[in-house]
Image (cartoon, grey):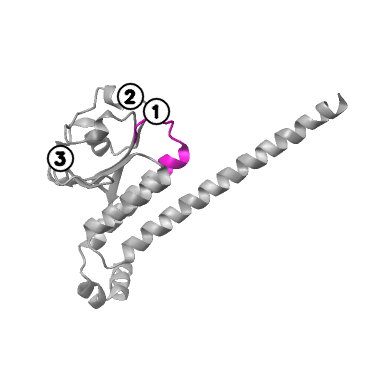
Amino acid sequence: MGWTGGGRPIIRGVSKLKDLEQRLERAEQQLRLFQRVSRFLVKDISLPDVLQGIVSLVVEYMQCDSCLIYLKDGNELVLCASSHPNPGAIGRVRLRLDEGLTGWVSRERRLLAISREAYNDSRFKRFNELPEDTYEAFLSAPVIARNRVVGVINVQHRAPHPHTGAEMEALTTLGEQIGCALVLARLDSESLAAANHAEWVLAAVRR
């Protein structure tokens, strides 16, 4: 009896230690994800390859069944990268900014997390080209560049999935990193090499 009563604090302590170890491991995984995405940003590779690389990293980190990146084209959002590339879908799947869950995220500039039956949400819009329309869980964040929404990144699970705070934080940060990639993509290697970055900074300071 005495051992049982005294053992409970030990058991609770072991449980807390395991929980802390899991949190630390997840934090390290998140850090590695951001580091690997950052390496894509500094490489001299095409923007489509950068986006596809990021999509693959997201699937690995989130252990999700799908990751899609939409970018704005005027008043529409266009599918530009997918973890399941479909030649018939990339560049052809489009929705207006007032359509679907993705359009809502773009308009509201807010993260959206639905743990089950995302297809039953009143804001949902179905696309026959996307098998993801039958998936249960939906997590989406705006892609931000220069403080403007320029796209949306979606993560989906086939089965119901309660999204963690770490997953939401990670997708929000990824949306910002993708925005940086879009800005950098407008500079070719020669222009970047010839640019006087010090002068740009100093000119801004003098204003």
* Amino acid at dot 2: Glu
Picture coordinates of residue 14 (x, y %)?
A: 70, 38
> Left or right of 144: which side holds 57?
right
The percent coordinates of residue 163 (x first, y second) are 43, 34
Q: Position of residue 122 (x, y in %)?
A: 25, 22
Q: Cβ–Cβ below 8 Å for labels 1 and 2? A: yes
Residue at the spot 13% in from the left edge and 41% down from the top edge: 75
Gap in Å between the C-alphas at discs 3 and 1?
A: 25 Å
User: The disc labelled 3 sits on which kind of residue?
Assistant: Val
The earlier-in-sequence mark between 3 and 1 is 3
| Residue designated by label 2 | 117
Q: CA distance from mark 2 to mark 3?
A: 22 Å
Q: Is residue 18 left or right of residue 48?
A: right
Q: Residue 166 magenta-drawn?
A: yes
State the residue position of label 3: 93
Residue at position x 27%, y 76% from top?
A: 196
Give the label on residue 160, or none.
1
Q: Which residues are magenta?
A: 157-169
Please identify the quarter of the rendering in which residue 156 is found: top left
Magenta stretch contains residue 29 = no
Locate the N terminus and report the quarter of the image it occupies: top right
